[in-house]
Amino acid sequence: MKRRAALTIATTLATELASADPVDLSAFRDLPRPPPAPQVLYGKAPAQGVDLFLPDDPGPHPVVALVHGGCWSATSAGREQMRHLGPELTRRGIAVWSIGYRRADEVGGGYPGTYRDVATALDRLVADSPDHRLDLSRVVLAGHSAGGHLALWAASRQSLPAASPLHGSVRFVPRAVISSGGVGDLATFARFVPVLGGPGIAERLAPTDKLAEVSPAALTPSAGSVIMVSGALDRLTPPWVAYDYVGALRRRPMVVPRLADIPDAGHFDLVTPSARAWQRVRGLIEEAVEVR
């Protein structure tokens, strides 16, 4: 009897430990991803599009504008990698505006094209909101990995000098910017970009003389709140990456970002619906847009 009880305990512990293992890249790639309906195109390149997922109710709908990751490189999937989050959020009454953009190693990408794509896609959200009954007073920007960097940048572009080709007024103020495993301070992270994205990515994404225009740590965000979510076991963008960004902003009078460190979570747990880490991220989104 004692032996059976010990075996049961050991089996339970093994199951719990296995469930705590971080989601790896292959498991993330294998997630089912339903096609969006419709897609919104804002340019001629295949990457210049938005996947739109709408709830069944008539609205007006709160919105999460998603920005995908992939190390800023076209060697990774584009906006399709976030399609599994469409049904995950629409069944909770939240519309999904999932942005594609030309990566740094695509024709027209890098500086300034990648940033202009993200800005254009968000401006298109404003223009198309009446057609899809989208509530611009309840929008969250949420980015993962490289998309976390771009979401933070998009919420800060109004603070760029007027002479910058990337300067533009923000046409709505998001309730929150949620950067999951994202990079806020490109100056401190730049040495890791070639390791993750490949040779030449850093130079095209953030030329040395343009770093202050594209690193969110050098800019001022315009949002109700900024939340930096990190998996404690993330080996691609460890928690210190978020700490660097928060430290840079705390030296200036502005909205102080919140840190949300999630135990037992890796990089891809933050965007995998079955993972507890995603449930935390989803809860932050729901809290920001006041889903009841």
Image: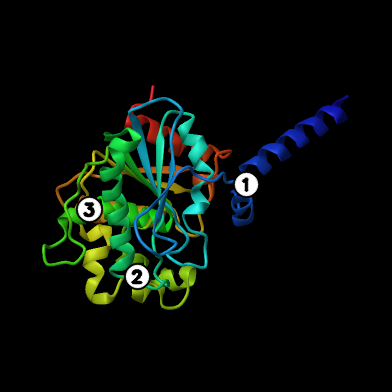
The amino acid pointed to by label 3 is: Ser
- Secondary structure category for the residue under label 1: loop
Foreground residue, 73 or 256? 73
Query: Distance from label 3 to label 1 (Cα)?
Result: 35 Å
Image quadrant where residue 215 sits: bottom left
Distance of mark 2 from mark 3, alpha carbons? Answer: 18 Å
Residue at image position (48%, 42%) is: 37
**Hey, what amino acid is under mark 1?**
Asp
Where is residue 140? Give x, y as percent: 33, 40
**In the structure shown, which secondary structural element does the residue marked by tag 3 occupy?**
loop
* Residue at 49% in and 40% down: 86
Which residue in the structure is indicated by mark 2? 110
Q: Mark 1 — residue? A: 21
The structure residue drawn at horizontal position 72% and vertical position 40%, both measured from the top left corner, is 14
Tell me, for residue 156, which label it has, or none. 3
x, y percent for residue 212: 22, 66
Mark 2 touching mark 3, by CB under 8 A? no
Can residue 240 be seen here? The reply is no
